[in-house]
Image: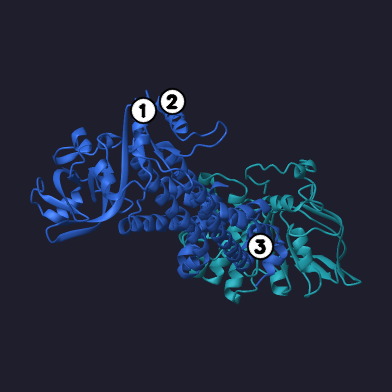
Amino acid sequence: MGTSSGAATSVEETRKDMGNNGDRPLIVTEDLWKTYEMGSEQIHALHGLTFKIERNEYVAIMGPSGSGKSTLMNVIGCLDTPTKGKYYINNRLVSELSDDELAFIRNKEIGFVFQTFNLLARATALHNVELPLIYNGTPAGPRLEQAKAALAKVDLADRMTHKPNELSGGQRQRVAIARALVNNPSIILADEPTGNLDTATGVDIMNLFERLWEQGNTIVLVTHEHDIAAHANRIIHIRDGRIEKDEKVR
Amino acid sequence: MNINLKESATIALNALNAHKMRSVLTLVGVIIGVTTVIAVVSIVQGLDSYVKNQVLQFGSDTFTVQKFPNFVTSFEEFLEYNKRRDLTLEDMKAIEERCSLCKAVAGIWDRSRTVKFGMQSIEDVDIRGVSVNAPFMGQVMELASGRHFTETDIDHVALRVIIGADVAEKLFYGRDPLGLELKIDGVPFEIIGVAKKTGSFFGQSMDNFARIPITMYQRMYGSHESLFINVQAPNEAQLPQAMDEVRVIMRARQHTPYKKDDGFALETAASFIDLWQSFSQGIFAVTISIASIALIVGGVVIMNIMLVSVRERTREIGIRKAIGARRRDILVQFLIEAVTLAGAGGLLGALLGIAIALIISKVSPLPAVIRWWSILMGIGMAASVGLFFGIYPASRAAKLDPIVALRFE
């Protein structure tokens, strides 16, 4: 996957760190800390994490609840910034960006897939998929085409005008995946994507991820289920904010 | 941004549509504010053109000399004016003789009396003692039949009368009144003319009158009241000079010392319009202060409902932020919603205000002029209220932390 084809934005600062070195890993973290103050006590949700994720990897981040995997996901997804340490996506140092600059990075580089789908209830499938393009200023014509193409990739071309409540759980999650794909992001970041689905539908969704990975996408999967994590080719186990084990599988 | 605009406006309109009752209640303050302004603007505009029209019929080249000014603003002032000497027929004659720039001079006294024809009678008829020139100054009094007074009628203190269209209708039912006998306070007058109908002014008929020679009026009622003297200049441009000339003549007659104020008032159509305008500005000021209170209350309610909306849609805001909406995008979205919401109230208020103005002009003598730009003004007013009171909720939405917002149930 190359960089996104979306229109340029004014957030120039984010480009300063941008080399064009395709050889460097897609994600690089150096000594990531996330610390919360609870009264006088300090709680370290991330305890100095250092790891890399290469292009077209399929990584599962596993850990029990409270392990810090949600915090890690928020930081990887640029929803949150680390208290200490450096985080690069695509050679861009993103750990010290402002809110709006992070929004720009999320729009360009990250495609979120959530456990609860998180679609806009009042909007059609097509409009939901269009949304990321709206926020980067893609003109209406190409936007519609890209959104339709993304829906076609998840086999929902015939459900474009349906609203979420007219779709099954699996279909909703596929709309969410189409939305994640539409901007050609560097990473697809999926947080328990099968958590709200029955087993058969969950398998369908995992097959879809498999396909997307085969097509060249980089996928980061956050889960606590072993059989879901087993779809990945690398599993990073998190416990108490530290990497407990980082293993290649398959 | 353009699609954002359309999308946000659509969301606001859909929400309005989905909760009609709530929307009306939400917008009630804004609607009342805008309705008030639009209704008052329409009525005042109506009055404005009406007054100008009517007053200008008095004649832009004409002024009156009178004891009291048209508007007396306090009782103290009234007492002061009341000390002035009454104007008399002699004053009128002096102006007639000595004023070189006065084309025509007429004197008028009037009072309300009952008139009778046989067994029939009408109360509260405006009895006017007039001089020869009176019907021709300003709006000319046209006759449907008969003739005007002549100098002879005035000089001979003739028992002759010219009646208004209302009096003719009510007493004679289509019979020709010419030559018949009309009794005013028991005194018989020969009817020599009937005036054409002129209509009403502020709901008051202008045709309910009987005109008699001013000399006859003086004989019947004495001259204990001050005379109204109408003076016509050769043209509008020479009106000020004519007024100056009359002022000098009157001051000389009243022996007014050099530095003392006039002991009489000179009034023109323009001075009446000026007075009307300062009066209508007063009406506007009062209306706007009342409407502002309604609009502020309406704005606070909109702010409240927008805060509820932001809370209800916290998760939506989180989703939007997660996929790349910046603070500004969220801010603009909620501002547009607030403006659309309030603007819809403004439209409703404007239409309601126009409807009320039309109803008032139908059931009361007050006229109304509907200006279509007042709809835009109403929407604009309401939209600015929405914009102002939408800032706080919208900035709350814009500042939401996406992680917290996404976790919101």
Residue B39 rendering spot, x and y as whole percentages: 42, 55
Residue A28 rendering spot, x and y as whole percentages: 82, 53
Q: Which structural element holds mark 1?
A: loop
Q: Which residue is mark 3?
A: B318
For residue B103, what is the image quadrant? top left
Q: Identify the subunit bearing mark 3.
A: B
Do the numbered discs 2 and 1 sit on residues whose CB atoms are within 8 Å? yes
Does residue B143 appear left or right of residue A8 in this picture? left
Q: Identify the subunit bearing mark 2.
A: B
Query: Which chain did the renderer colour blue?
Result: B
Q: Residue drawn 42% across and 30% down?
A: B246
Q: Which residue is mark 2?
A: B241
Q: Amino acid at mark 2?
A: Gln
Instruction: State the mark number for residue B233.
Output: 1
Q: Earlier in the sequence, mark 2 or mark 1?
A: 1
Q: Residue drawn 40% across and 45% down?
A: B48
Residue B316 rendering spot, x and y as whole percentages: 61, 63
Q: Which structural element holds mark 2?
A: helix
Distance in Å between CA atoms under marks 2 and 1: 9 Å
Q: Amino acid at mark 3?
A: Gly
Q: Identify the subunit bearing mark 1.
A: B
Instruction: Answer yes or no: is residue A127 visible.
Output: no
Instruction: Answer yes or no: is residue A206 visible.
Output: yes
Q: Which structural element holds mark 3?
A: helix
Query: Which chain did the renderer colour cyan?
Result: A
Do the numbered discs 3 and 2 sit on residues whose CB atoms are within 8 Å? no
